[in-house]
Image (tube, rainbow, N blue to C red):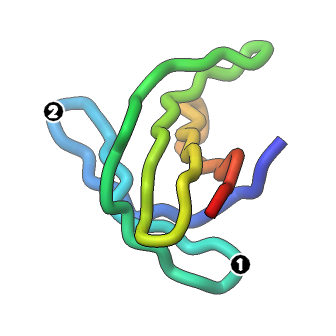
Amino acid sequence: MGDRVDVLAKFSYGRAWPEKFWWHGREYQVVTINLIFQRKDGGRKYTCFAVSTATLEVELDLDRDDLTWILRGSSG
């Protein structure tokens, strides 16, 4: 699984764009969105963003059913 995180995102033209997130008490600014893709896990649907910050490369997944965010695969 992953960690639930708070994300500040911009919603425009029916799409979400993560701008920053908070993880383990720290704030991270999204510098680059490297890839956007869709994932299904059981009956859940996610829009997934592979993003880079100044110090991390992570995947932020938006649960399209309840609009919560999950951070997966941190490196950096």
Q: CA distance from mark 2 to mark 1?
A: 31 Å
Say above or below: 43 vs 8.
above
Q: Which is more toward the observer, 26 or 46?
A: 26
Residue 66's tag is none
Q: Residue furthest bottom?
A: 25
Residue 24's tag is 1
Q: Earlier in the sequence, mark 2 or mark 1?
A: 2
Percent x, y for residue 66?
60, 40
Which residue carries the number 2 mark?
13
Say above or below: 18 vs 1.
below
- Badge nearest the viewer, 2 or 1: 1
Q: Secondary structure at mark 1?
A: loop
> Residue 9 occupies which quadrant of the picture?
bottom left
Q: Residue at x 40, y 32 (%)?
A: 35
Which quadrant of the figure contains the C terminus?
A: bottom right
Residue 49 is left or right of residue 15, and the answer is: right
